[in-house]
């Protein structure tokens, strides 16, 4: 006679679990060596992603009062005639032309959009960088969970990416 656990495993393998338990499982890597199979379908992915976005915006929000830096903002933004183009066909075509030694059309389009909304006010440019960074942190979390199934480890890595002080230079 098979035990209750063996019968349940057999039903799950065949996909006919009468209890309604999820039939797809993933390894729970939060407890090393246990080998337990747990479902991640009930994990709060949306809430964790939203928390990452809110935390990133809260940490980097003070950049709205910062100025452009002297490193390359003067050349890339303030003195760049390409970003002052309208957002029509002419402006988009101009974004695909090299500016000096740079050919970065998506950057120029982003700068054109920022210029249309903010002019040469640095706060708008910096806050859009923060928004991109916050969305990337949420996407990183969702990608890691999708690849590994490890919810809390993925959240930790994404939070480290989002909030680590090393990213201040690239975000702000």
Image (tube, rainbow, N blue to C red):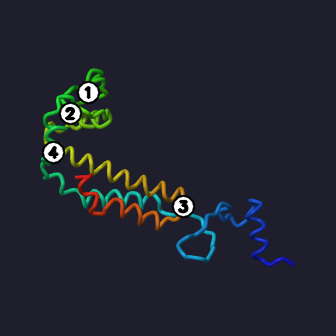
Q: How crowded is mark 3: few (under 14 residues within 10 Å), some or many (20 or more)?
A: some
Q: Earlier in the sequence, mark 1 or mark 2?
A: 1
Instruction: Report the residue marked by disc 1.
Output: 87
Q: Residues within 10 Å of mark 4 (few under 14, many from 20)?
A: many
Image coordinates for residue 130, horizontal then vertical, percent: 27, 51
Query: Residue placed at 56% from the left, 63% from the top?
Result: 40
Image coordinates for residue 2, horizontal then vertical, percent: 83, 77
Per the model, the C-alpha gap separating discs 1 and 3 is 41 Å
4 and 3 marks in contact (CB < 8 Å)? no
Q: Earlier in the sequence, mark 3 or mark 2?
A: 2
Q: Earlier in the sequence, mark 4 or mark 2?
A: 2
Mark linked to residue 122: 4
Image coordinates for residue 141, horizontal then vertical, percent: 44, 58
Q: Earlier in the sequence, mark 1 or mark 4?
A: 1
Instruction: Report the residue marked by disc 3.
Output: 148
Q: What element carries label 4?
A: helix
Q: Which of marks 1 and 3 is nearer the N terminus?
A: 1
Per the model, the C-alpha gap separating discs 3 and 2 is 41 Å
Classify residue 74 by image quadrant.
top left
Q: Nearer the viewer, mark 4 or mark 2?
A: 4
1 and 3 marks in contact (CB < 8 Å)? no
Residue 127 versus residue 71: which sits nearer the camera? 71
Q: What element carries label 3?
A: helix
Per the model, the C-alpha gap separating discs 4 and 3 is 39 Å
Instruction: Report the residue marked by disc 2.
Output: 116
């Amino acid at each position: 006679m098979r035990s209750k656990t063996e019968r349940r495993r057999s039903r799950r393998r065949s996909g006919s679990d009468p209890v309604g338990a999820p039939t797809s499982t993933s390894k729970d890597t939060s407890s090393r060596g246990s080998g337990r199979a747990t479902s991640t379908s009930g994990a709060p992915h949306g809430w964790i992603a939203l928390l990452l976005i809110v935390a990133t915006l809260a940490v980097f929000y003070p950049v709205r009062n910062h100025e452009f830096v002297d490193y390359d903002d003067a050349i890339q933004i303030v003195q760049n005639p390409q970003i002052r183009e309208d957002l029509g066909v002419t402006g988009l075509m101009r974004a695909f032309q090299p500016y000096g030694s740079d050919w970065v059309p998506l950057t120029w389009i982003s700068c054109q959009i920022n210029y249309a909304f903010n002019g040469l006010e640095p706060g708008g440019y910096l806050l859009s960088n923060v928004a991109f960074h916050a969305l990337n942190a949420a996407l990183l979390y969702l990608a890691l969970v999708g690849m590994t199934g490890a919810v809390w480890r993925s959240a930790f890595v994404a939070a480290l990416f989002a909030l680590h002080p090393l990213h201040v230079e690239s975000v702000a």
